[in-house]
Image (cartoon, rainbow, N blue to C red):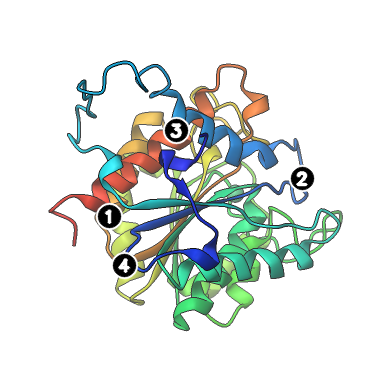
Amino acid sequence: MRTFLRAEQTHPTELEDDIDIGILGVPYDYGASRKPGARYGPSGVREQMVGEYHFRVNSNEDYVSFPSETKRNYSDIKARDCGDAPIDPKSATETTKKVSEYVEQVASKTMPIIVGGDHYITYPSFIGYANSIEQDVGLIHLDAHTDTSDEDDLYGRHFHGSPMARINDSKYGSYNTHAMVGIRGRAGSEFLDIREQYDLYVDYAEEVKEKGIEDSIRGAIDHVTSKVDHVYLTVDIDVVDPGFAPGTGTPTFNGLTSGQLIKAMEILGNCSAIGAADMMEVAPDLDPTDTTSLLAARALERYLQSQMSDSSK
Ligand SMILES: [Mn+2]
């Protein structure tokens, strides 16, 4: 079966109490401002998580391969594929309601990992997680773009350029507990005010190159965890350079390498304050080689392998 991590499928309302991770998809790209296609992100990532094993199944059960860097198979983790959240293609606000409820159901039982979908979906996912713990939640945000538009002339208040503004407006989120890594290209003018007004951590892609991804991510973790106990991790795959990950709606040059994203996920996997995570903006049809969805799958797997390791704290 083509499921996330080849895990059993379980509806959020039927999750057992001893599950480590519940992964769900949100096939929504009605918030995309440039090219759509992220609605196929969940199916693309599922496909790549299965692919590696296709030819092993029923061929030789004694043969075991392992990830050479971590020596940990994520099959050791107790995961469930919680299916795809319901969406409403006609309404971002209805979608917000449906997705936040679905994520909250998963989060009340286990750690949710959300695979989008365009980046607007981070807003309802964040709300679903925050509602499940009823506490302030910080944000670690890997992206080429700030996604801080408050209101856009064309797209209004609910599209993939506005999720961070909506999170900042919400009861549990604030730019004061938000860290961005990998920013480049165009940002809305509101971003300059936000940087003045709030204690926001920003490492532009150029700075990541100078200081190294390790320092950048550790800085982001320190900034956010010094203020809040609970963190939501969001990854827009366009944080990676389109040379490595072209399958996304808003590709932007001069980004991270695929290796830097994998390293980032390894470090983030050791941050126990992270209680929910997402992978957004993967648009498999825009990349005929499938490299983009493969990278998204490997990045999530590395995060989970790292989280399982003994050094995790
Ligand atoms: Mn984004």
Q: Residue at x 47, y 36 (%)?
A: 296
Do residues under tags 1 and 3 come within 8 Å of each other at their CB atoms?
A: no
Amino acid type, label 2: Ser
Instruction: Give the left or right position of residue 40, taking residue 183 as reference.
Output: right
Q: Which residue in the protein does label 2 denote?
A: 33
Horizontal and vertical percent position of residue 219: 30, 57
Q: Alpha carbon of mark 2 to alpha carbon of mark 3: how far?
A: 28 Å
- Identify the residue under disc 4: 273
The three-letter code of the residue at mark 4 reads Ala
Task: Give the quadrant of residue 158.
Answer: bottom right
Q: Is residue 5 above or below residue 136?
A: above
Eye-nearest disc, 2 or 4 = 4
Which is nearer the eye, 16 or 137? 16
Label 4's element? loop
Answer few, some or many: residues within 10 Å of disc 4's Cα (few below 14, many 20 plus, some between 14 and 19). Answer: many
Respond yes or no on whether mark 2 lies under 8 Å from ligand 1: no
Where is residue 290? Give x, y as percent: 55, 22
In what quadrant of the picture does the C terminus appear?
bottom left
SS at mark 3? helix
Q: Residue furthest left?
A: 310
Answer few, some or many: residues within 10 Å of disc 1's Cα (few below 14, many 20 plus, some between 14 and 19): some
- What residue sits 20% from the left and 31% below the top? 69
Q: Earlier in the sequence, mark 3 or mark 4?
A: 3
Can residue 199 be seen here? The reply is: no
Which residue is the site of mark 1? Answer: 218
**Amino acid type assigned to the residue bearing label 3 in the image:** Met
Q: Between residues 294 and 148, which one lies in front from this camera angle? A: 294
For marks 2 and 4, give the CA distance.
32 Å
